[in-house]
Amino acid sequence: MATVNVVIKHQGKKYDVEVDTAATGEVLKYQLYSLTGVEPDRQKILVKGGQLKDDTDMSKLGLKPGQVIMMMGTPGDSGATIQRPTEKIKFLEDMTEAEVAQQAGATPSGLVNLGNTCYLNATLQAMRSIPELQDLLASHKHTSMTDIPQLDLTNQLKDLYKEMSETTGSVVPFAFLQALRMAFPQFAERSRKGTGYAQQDAEEAWSQIVSQLRQKLKLPAASEGTSDSTTAQGFVDKYMAGEFATTLECDDPAAGEAGEQPTSSREPFLKLNCHIGNQTAHLRDGLVEGLTEKIEKRSEVLGRDVTYTKTSRISRLPKYLTVHFVRFFWKRDVQKKAKIMRKVTFPHELDAVEFCTDELRKALIPVRDKVREVRKEEEDVERARKRRKKNPLLDGEVPGGESSSKKQKTEEGEASAKKDDKKPEKKTDGDGDVAMTETYKTDAEWDAERDAAILQAKKELNALIDPELRKDGGANQSGIYELRAVVTHQGASADSGHYTAYVKKTAPRDPDTGKVGEEDGKWWWFNDDKVTEVTADKIDALAGGGESHSALILLYKAIPLPTAEGIME
């Protein structure tokens, strides 16, 4: 091992350091961290050719014995003196199963298939991705005098989710399955091919469970500003139900000539249907088609049955939006629900503004556009920070090459931006005259200004939220949704095949402090009792196009918006 003894100068102090020339810059940074307390990512070490990088080959720097190297940087909050933990450290093997399940990164519980019950397992896993539902179920109490607790679907869902939250193993959903079959006998249908129960449609299970929750699961009346428990709002109506503004107009011109006027009404909805036709290639195409339908009904003015066109626009977007791909249809010749195999792509982020009424669009568009503006600013700042950390000479690039030329232009642009932010400084020359010079802001000052600008933009974003939408805590206030869960089907018909669920991983939460970290963009794949971590590209492969897994139900969640202080909760 070849070493060179150099002198590191930092804040007026000198440190004799033995540098291993066979190592990288990262090793030297950790050496200096132990001496100065300045974290490696906060260190700026000036060497020949620029700033020392983590992957710099120390042998190429030509260091000489006794050479003085300048280091800049100050310790962050994490650079404080290490103290003994105030609480006794508890190791994983000493924890209970429930404690292990609550740890960050713990694998969630799977559900055992009880015989063609994959449709139910997938539905329950996707629905469990709604944190507000889990929180309210935890405080739910069975109060009905007519229903038996064991047959109360809402009460059974509460018990099931509680059991799932206390283990990383598999759970047998037998009690919930029994309650479901008692409430909806269709799910107790026997298989025609032999013993056991028949396969069912996951979308039907989703709809029936949601309908039960709509009836039974109520929010505390006090949270709605009233002491009258009879006026308590339902969970589903607040968080999962949207509203259509519909117009019904007769297609026959004779009706209009006879004085019949189009009628308008408001209708609640619990899901949006994506109809799949010969030209449907994307989710948007199917949703647009589903907002217009033809209805045969009697016209009192004409005295006969005629065709009406029903046009719908969304007047309220819920926080959680369910989208159903209408892939199954009744095929008479085989007497079963056949599957439409056509490939239909869907986005990870859905802009639902175009499906709304003009009034709602007017309230959503300013917020949506500001969200995009803030995101672009954040991305630009992050890219600039990454570029400043790179040094073409240390990367081994040829000066003047294409990549080097691009970086040079970028650096010139950043230098120009910093020059625009320059500060005049007074300086006295030898004759006593005052000369004006220019000083440039440091990277830290430049970053601080950009961060302050983004924070201000987030405050402005919050101020743009429509007052009426702000009062509605269960509504989408921007019109933008992020995909959180997908229920898939594999096979050629609803009565056969296999259902699974994909649920996006939530950000890790410290069980002691409650502090939430950042999401890693990965997903959990729930295949009954088998739970696997997968990457986001697996979701893109669920568009269909054959008998492989294709999306049947999508669960979207409204994107979070900053508070009045500009903080993302």
Image (cartoon, rainbow, N blue to C red):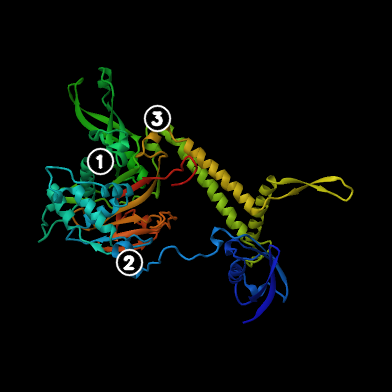
* Residue 429 pos. (x, y %): 85, 49
Label 3 to label 1: alpha-carbon separation: 29 Å
Residue 504 left/right relative to 306 = right
Asked whether residue 492 appears in the rendered view, the answer is: no
Q: Secondary structure at mark 2?
A: loop
Residue type at mark 3 is Glu
Q: Horizontal and vertical percent for residue 349?
A: 41, 47
**Residue 124 vertical placement versus 558 (above, below):** below
Question: Rounded to the nearest whole Å, what is the CA distance between mark 2 and mark 3?
Answer: 54 Å
User: Dividing the picture into quarters, in which one does residue 279 lie?
Assistant: top left
Q: Can you identify the residue that label 3 sits on? A: 359
141 sits to left or right of 87: left
Which residue is found at the position 44% from the left and 43% from the top?
Answer: 561
Q: Which residue is mark 1?
A: 218
User: Which residue is drawn at the image coordinates 26% and 55% (left, top)?
Assistant: 162
Q: Identify the element where label 1 is drawn.
A: loop
Amino acid type for the residue under numbered disc 1 = Lys
Residue at horizontal 20 percent and vertical 44 percent from the top: 212
Above/below status of 83 relative to 135: below
Which of the marked residues, 1 or 2, is nearer the chain's N terminus? 2
The label nearer to you, 1 versus 2, is 2
* Residue furthest to the top: 258
Give the distance between the C-alpha atoms of the residues marked 1 and 2, in whole angstroms.
35 Å
Instruction: Give the number of the disc on residue 569.
Output: none
Q: Which is nearer the N-term, disc 2 or disc 3? A: 2
Coordinates of residue 397 in the picture (x, y in percent): 64, 65
Q: Earlier in the sequence, mark 3 or mark 1?
A: 1
What residue would you read off at disc 2?
95
Work out which residue is located at the far bottom of the displayed protein and give it.
1
- Is 209 left, or right, of 508 in this rendering? left
Label 2 with label 3: CB-CB less than 8 Å: no
